[in-house]
Image (cartoon, helix red, strand yellow):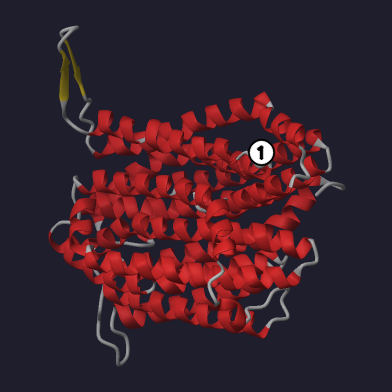
Amino acid sequence: MTTGAIPSKLLHLAWPLVLGNLLQTFYNLADMFWVGRVSSDAVAAVSLMFPLSWMFVSTAMGITAATIALVSQYVGADDDRMADRVVAQTVLLTLAVSSVLAAVGLAFRAPLLTLIGARGDVYVEAMAYIEIIFLALPFTFLFFAFRASLQGAGDTRTAMWLMVLSAGLNVVLDPFFILGWGPFPEMGTRGAAVATFIARGFATAAGIYILLRGGFGVRLRVGDLAPDLEIQKRLVDIGYPATIDGWARSFAAVAMAGFVARFGAAPTAAYGIGVRLMSVTWSVSGAVGQATATGVGQNLGARAPDRAAAVAKTATAGTMAVIFVAAALVLLFPAQAMGIFVDDPAVIAEGVVFLRIIAPFWALFAGVMVIQGAFRGAGNTREAMVLSFLSRWIFRIPVALVLAFAWSVTVPVLGITVSALDWGVSGIWWAFAAGMGLSFVVAVAWFARGTWKEDVIGEGAGDGQRGLESGDGEGDATSN
């Protein structure tokens, strides 16, 4: 990334990441497609679980972001033996964390669903789904460990092809378990979770086998599975900023889903489908953000800050152009886009309103995600995290509370009464749009200041800890 034409280099670096992210999104879209053949309550139930699932994924990505950093550093230093030890400790850490989360989630699943806002038939369907998803958490975390280990060693294609097989298996199994094709009983939302469980289990088993066999840059050695507290501490120290960032985003998504759930099953189902359609754009822009992080980091390390800025600008402009075209298609055919997943007229009508309000802002948020990748590549993970907090907890949730609900507060000293606008669920849709637009303005202004270049150049791009922080940022770019 330090020489040659920037657009072609970015494309070469980004396409495997884009495809891998889209395959992950394909999991969710396939589940929604077949669940939509059951009922709108089933769609609403799976929709409520989507942000909760991403909270767990964010945790896994935070842990394994440190894996990418450490493995890549050791491989670059020709210390393959230490890289292998990091892989083994990552497997231990992800297995321990995921097992604890699964146990806690199963123990408190009922109050958790109530807190999110599941009611009536939606609660029943969500319970059937979430119980299996909690059991699948160790598979999810272990697959992230496998993917991060290979990515740190420079192999991104093996995990990508394994995702192809896993996603394909999930798509094939969905109708059999959800709708009861052939000899299988009709299980509805539970069937979607069972199909996901099997597909993730397959991918995890294959990934662990590949690591045990070796030959892909790193190897999982059974003798290295004894706990090494020093490596474990380094994994936690490097990974926790990415995890906190991911949690903040996930909790915000859970809060927004809870707000929508107050307006009934149809808006909740429409929200779930709309978010999944948006997740396609997140997959693309998040992957380009990862590629941007690599390009910015390499060029700052090569003392070429102007080229680093050019990489970020090229990536941002190109991604926004692509997402703009995708959003335009959705705006032209919103009912058809919703109709792919559900045939309930009430859900489709609400989904059309949702898409018409927020689709024009998709390209802006894609730009934010790429700029966040540039900050992470520069090692300035705080800026990326602050942008996440601003876009969700400052520009989105408070705006939703003001626009969507009916309430009023009187300020005693001034004698002034402040009232919410009570726009209903449309106010939540406009809050999404406001968060995307305002965060883009802040991101562009912050990037234009150029402090991200001065900070790294001033401290020295060759500093080892700084390099680890840069790797940490790269690993988290897709969890938006």
State whether residue 426 is above or below residue 2. above
Relative placement, left or right, of 314 versus 472 is right
The foreground one among 425 and 258 is 258
Q: Residue 271 appears at what percent x and percent y?
A: 32, 50
Q: Which residue in the rendered view is the most extreme toward the bottom?
A: 183
Residue 270 drawn at (x, y percent): 30, 52
Residue 1, image x, y percentages:
80, 49
Question: As drawn, which residue projects farthest toward the left?
Answer: 120
Q: Residue at x 23, y 71 (%)?
A: 128
**Would you name the residue on which mark 1 appears?**
317
Q: Is 450 positioned to the left or the right of 387 in the image?
A: right
Residue 425: give x, y in percent of width and height: 25, 39
- Label 1: few (<14), some (14–19) or many (≥20) C-alpha neighbours in 10 Å: some
Identify the residue shown where x is 62% and y is 74%: 161
Depth order, front residue of 405/61 = 61
Residue located 25% across and 81% down the image? 186
Circle 1: residue type: Ala
| Snapshot quadrant of residue 114 | bottom left
Residue at image position (74%, 35%) is 459
Q: In the rendered view, would you say 326 is above or below 343?
A: above
Q: Is residue 466 visible?
A: yes
Q: Secondary structure at mark 1?
A: helix
Q: How many marks?
A: 1
Q: Nearer the viewer, residue 161 or 235?
A: 235
Please identify the quarter of the rendering in which residue 380 is found. Answer: top right
Q: Nearer the viewer, residue 216 or 223?
A: 223
Q: Is residue 338 left or right of residue 238?
A: left
